[in-house]
Image (cartoon, rainbow, N blue to C red):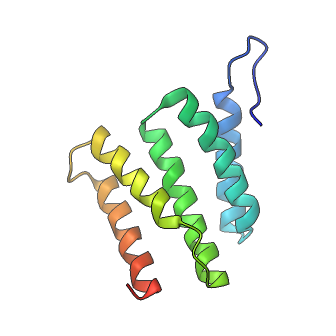
């Protein structure tokens, strides 16, 4: 479900609100609700912005939150795929050795270490 403005276009402001709600919920350990907010924000942002840093940031936040879910429930919810997508976009947007890419690579390393890979 996407929320549209009166002219029929999707609302980036609403996506921002959902992203911020997802961040707050994740900080308080409400991972299921957080994931839903991030997914909603991601759907809108991808449709409107394509491969942009804002989309990469949303994938990163969703990946980190899903990783927290995985560790808490000892399951695999494909957190790595969101982190990998964030990395792909950042490498398109920035130089290969950009700080944001390093942050994502670190998160992937921590995730793999915790999974025993």
Residue 6 location in percent, x, y?
79, 14
- Work out whether 20 lies above or below 93: below
Q: Quadrant of the N terminus?
A: top right
Of residues 90 and 20, which is closer to you in this image?
90
Q: Quadrant of the C terminus?
A: bottom left
Q: Where, by quadrant of the figure, is residue 110 drawn?
A: bottom left
Query: Residue shown at 48%/40% (left/top)?
Result: 54
Extreme residue in the bottom direction? 116
Residue 34 location in percent, x, y?
70, 59
Of residues 97 and 28, which is closer to you in this image?
97
Q: Count the numbered circles shown.
A: 0
Extreme residue in the top direction? 7
Query: Residue shown at 64%/42% (left/top)?
Result: 41
Whether residue 8 sits left or right of residue 59 in the image: it is right
Q: Where, by quadrant of the figure, is residue 106 drawn?
A: bottom left
Query: Residue shown at 59%/69% (left/top)?
Result: 77
- Work out whether 97 lies above or below 40: below
Q: Where, by quadrant of the figure, is residue 102 drawn?
A: bottom left
- Work out whether 113 lies above or below 14: below
Whether residue 49 sits left or right of residue 65 in the image: it is left
Whether residue 2 sits left or right of residue 85 in the image: it is right
């Amino acid at each position: 479900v996407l929320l549209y403005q009166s002219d029929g276009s999707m609302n980036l402001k609403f996506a921002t609100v959902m992203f911020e709600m997802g961040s707050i919920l994740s900080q308080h350990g409400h991972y299921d609700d957080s994931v839903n907010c991030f997914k909603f924000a991601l759907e809108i942002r991808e449709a409107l912005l394509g491969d942009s840093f804002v989309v990469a940031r949303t994938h990163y936040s969703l990946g980190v939150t899903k990783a927290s879910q995985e560790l808490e429930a000892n399951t695999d919810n494909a957190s790595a795929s969101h982190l990998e997508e964030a990395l792909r976009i950042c490498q398109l947007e920035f130089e290969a050795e950009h700080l944001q890419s390093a942050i994502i690579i670190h998160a992937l390393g921590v995730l793999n270490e915790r999974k025993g890979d």
